[in-house]
Amino acid sequence: DSGSLSISGNRSLYDATSSGELTRVGAVLGTPLYMSPEQCRGEHLDPRSDIYSLGVIAYQMLSGAPPFEGDFKHVMEAHKSVTPRPLKTRGVRRKMRRVIDNSLSKDPEKRPQTAEAFASELRARSEGIWALLRRAMVIYSEHLTKFLSLSALFYVVPAVLTFAVILISFLRVSGQISDIAGSTILGVLYVVLSLSGAFFATLNVAAIVWITTQYLSVPLRPVSVRKTLREVLRNWKRVSASGALAAFMPIVAAIIGSVLVFAVIGGMVKVMSMASGLNLYAPIVGASFGGLTFPIVFFVVYVSCLLVTPVAMMERTRIREGFRRSRKLVKRAFVTSLAAAAIMFLVPAILAGCLSFFVQVTAKAYSPSKPDADTATPTTDQSQNGDIQINTSTSKGGFDWSLGPKHASPAVPEPMDMQDKIKHTVLESAVQIFWLPLQIIMLSFTGIIVALLYIKTRLAGGESMHDLIERFEDEGRPRKKWQERVRQRLIQSGRIPSKP
C-alpha cells in the first residue's frame, strides 16, 4: 500500500479505514487546567462549558494560580468533583468573587449562560459606589454644558415661581398687601412650587438618564438635547406618573409602618403593664418604636423606588411593572443603591444647611445688632428648698433659664419691628436665590448617578444592552415611509452603513 507507512516506519493516519475513527464520540480533548467538568467526563458540550474555562482564566488572573494544579489526571478529577479553593485576593470585591465562583460551578445551570452575561456581571460587580461616582464625574465634565442647559430649561417654571414668592414676601413686608392676603398667596405659591418642582425634576432626571444611557450604549453618536426633549415629551405621562408615586410611596409606607409598630408594641406593653400592675408607659414606648420605624421604612422604600424613573423612561413599562422592575434591579446591588440614595438625599440637605448658615453669619457680620440700653443683669436666688435659680433677661426678647423649679414666667419675645422684618425677608430671599443654581447643579449630577446605577444593576443580572441600543437606533431612523425607502436604498448602495 502506497502511503500506509510514514518515512520513519510508523503507521500513518492513512491506515484508518474510516474518517470516523479519527475523532471518536466521547473522546476527551482539551487542556486539563481549563477543562470543564462535562468536558472531563466526555459529555456533550455547549457554550456554558466555555464559561467554566473563562472562570478558570479569571481565577488565575486574580489569584496568580489556577484553581487546581498537579498531574493532569488529578486536575481532571478535581474539575469533576472538587470545589475550588476560595478566591482570596486583596482589592477584589466579594461580589466579584461570587461571580467567579458561580462560573466555576459544577452545574452548568448555575453558571452565567453566555459570555456576554459573564462579562456584564464581572464589570458590574467590580465597581462600587466610589467607582460609580468617578464615572459620573467623568461623564458630567464631558457634557457639562448640555446637562446644565437641560436642567436650567426644566427649572424655568420653578425659578419663576421662586421669584414670585420673593416678590410677594416683599410686598407683604412693605405693607402693599395685607398679612392675610400675603400669607394666603404665599401658601398657594409654595404648594405650586413644590408640585411643579417635583414634576420638572422627574422629567429632568428622565432626560439625563436618556443622555447617559445613549453615551454608554452608542458612544459614537453625538448627544442631541433636542432629540432628548422629544423623547421625554413622548413619554412624559408615564414618567411623571411613576415619579409622583415613587415620591409619595416612601412617605405613605413609613406612616403605615409607624402606626402598625406603635399599635403592636404599645399594645404588648399595655398588656404587660396590666398583667404586672406596673405603669410601663405603653404610649411612650410605642411612640418611641414607631418613631424609630419611620425613617427606616422611609429609606428602605425610597431605595427600592430609586430606579422607577429610569425604568419608565428606557423600558416603557406600566407603572406597577415599573415598581416591580425597580425592586428587582435594586436587590442586585442593594448596598451600592443604599449608598447612592444616601448621597443623593444627604448632600443636598447638607448644602442647604451650610448655605443658610453662611447667609446668616454673613448678615450678622455686616449688620451687627445694636447694643441694648438695658444690659442683661443675671440674678442668683436660692429658694427655700435649696434649689438654685439663675434668671437672665434682656430688654429685647432675651432668654430665661433656671436650675431647679422655675417660678417666674418666661420672657415673651417682642414682635419684630419693620427693620427686623425686612432683614428676615432679605435673608430668606437670598437663601432661595443662591439655592436655585445649586439645585440645578445637584439635580443634573444626581441624574447621572441614577442612570449609572440603572445600567450597573442591569449588568449585574447579566442582561444585554442590545434592547437599549435598539431604542437609540429606532430613534435615529426616519419617521416617514419614503424616508425609510431612501434610507434602505442608500444602505444597499453602500453609501451609508446599516448601523450607526
Image (tube, grey):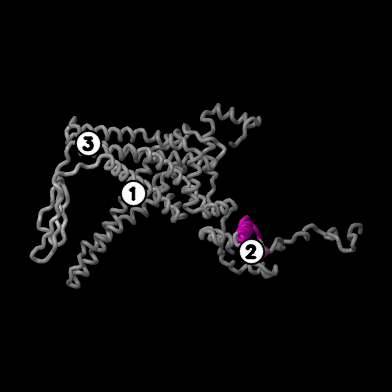
SS for callout 2: loop
Look at the magenta stretch and give its main secondary structure.
helix
Q: Which is nearer the N-term, disc 2 or disc 1?
A: 2
SS for callout 3: helix
One can see residue 317 in this view: no
* Image x and y of residue 433, in percent: 32, 37
Q: Which of 109 and 65 is in front in this view?
A: 65
Location of the N terminus (image quadrant):
bottom right
Q: Name the residue under label 3.
A: 422
Q: Mark 1 points at which residue?
A: 249
Which quarter of the picture shows residue 206? top left
Residue 222 versus residue 392 in the image, above or below:
above
Q: Which is nearer the N-term, disc 3 or disc 2?
A: 2
Disc 3 to disc 1, C-alpha distance: 39 Å
Magenta span contains residue 43: yes
Q: Which is nearer the N-term, disc 3 or disc 1?
A: 1
Q: Which of 427 and 493 is in front in this view?
A: 427
Q: Tell me if 170 is positioned left or right of 237 in this view.
A: left
Disc 2 to disc 1, C-alpha distance: 50 Å
Location of the C terminus (image quadrant):
top right
Q: Tell me if 418 is positioned left or right of 59 in this view.
A: left
Q: What stretch is highlighted in magenta?
A: 35-61
Which quarter of the picture shows residue 52? bottom right
* Image x and y of residue 375, in percent: 15, 48
What amino acid is found at the position of numbered circle 1 in the picture?
A: Met
Magenta span contains residue 2: no
Write the residue at 48% across / 45% down. 136
One can see residue 398 in this view: yes
Q: Mark 2 points at which residue?
A: 65
